[in-house]
Amino acid sequence: QLARWLRFPESYGPSEWGPIPFLPDRSLLVRRMERQWGPIEAQRPGVLGMTGNGTAMVAGLQFGNVFIGVQPLLGLEGDPMRLLFERDLTPHYQYAAFYRWLQEDFRADAVIHFGMHGTVEWLPGSPLGNSGLSWSDVLVGELPNIYVYACNNPSESIIAKRRGYGTIVSHNVPPYGRAGLYKQLASLKELLVEFREDPAANRALRGLICDAVALTGLADDCPFAPGRPLLRSEDAEGVTEAEFEDYASRLYSYLLVVEQRLFSEGLHVLGAAPSPQQSEQYLSAYLEGRLGDDAVAGIAGGEDLERVRARLEAAVEAGPARKEALQAAEEGVEVRDLLQLNSQEISSVLE
């Protein structure tokens, strides 16, 4: 059945095949697959994607006229990226059967690809434009392809459009927040703060600081000296005050960098606007201290620009500082309103 689905129609002539010097065999694609994977009629259990009776498995669940499936694995055992870069290879039988089944048997009106990214647009030949013999063209066919794609990766979404004929519906990325410090890192920062207040009086903290560095594994990221990354606690008393104070300063500065790093907090929920707390974390990271915590919290909580302005005019004296704060507030309100557009992600797919 798969061989029949992959054969080109008998009616194909020069106008369908295009400007090539000869008309290919109708079963050209099947012959290519057989060279890679063996005779199509002789598939057996144990071959990639084959069931116990030797048929290709289409994994998924059907709910009425909606089928939710898992895109088959793409690749060769031990070399999963090979199919992406060798243009003469072909997808395996289960992979081809999955997409052809959607069109020929299930008769889908459209397909929605969720997530960045799938593999159909990366099938052999991805550096080139599509032709009627390209696997992405063969498998997607005339099926409308709606592709829900992360907005922060436009370069690869172009591949999904060019090769997979995808209509891109962008979704937002997970909300950002500051990494902060926790457990041993937070304890190390407290030790460093206490030591730097009075290095001479707090000399006894040297050994504790060295132990904390060893426990947290910071010696590689912030070494004591070239060729001597870890300063052991028993050796701490043997270095000069200037050397240890310099080391403590470098450790403290490094922890501040780590504490302020941005990271994606959790997963993005498609179609859901961020909570006020998530918006506040995002805006705090975006504005980078240009606006006070109270104003950021107000914006995240839904205050309009006029109310935020009134708050700032009452709290900040007239001058350059107020002007900068008002500009930051405008940016904050604009970003907050854009984040609320997450709720349109689902409606954009359906429309």
Image (cartoon, rainbow, N blue to C red):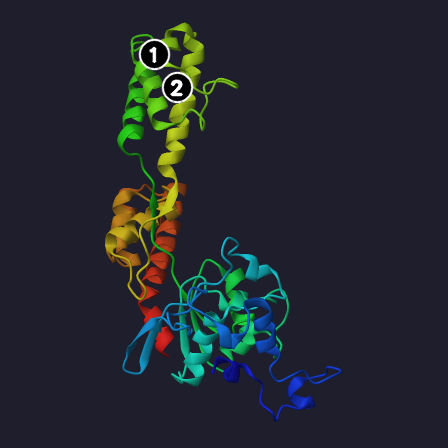
Q: CA distance from mark 2 to mark 1?
A: 10 Å
The residue shown at (45%, 12%) is: 243
Q: Secondary structure at mark 2?
A: helix
Quadrant of the image occupied by residue 306: bottom left
In this rendering, does residue 312 appear at all? yes
Q: Secondary structure at mark 1?
A: loop
Towards the viewer: 24 or 222: 24
Residue at which label 1 appears: 199
Q: Position of residue 247 (x, y in %)?
A: 43, 18
The residue shown at (59%, 66%) is: 89
Are discs 2 and 1 less than 8 Å apart at CB?
yes
Quadrant of the image occupied by residue 245: top left
Q: Position of residue 351 (x, y in %)?
A: 37, 79
Residue kind at label 2, given as amino acid type: Ala
Residue at which label 2 appears: 248
Q: Position of residue 163 (x, y in %)?
A: 55, 71
The residue shown at (44%, 17%) is: 246
Towards the viewer: 332 or 96: 96
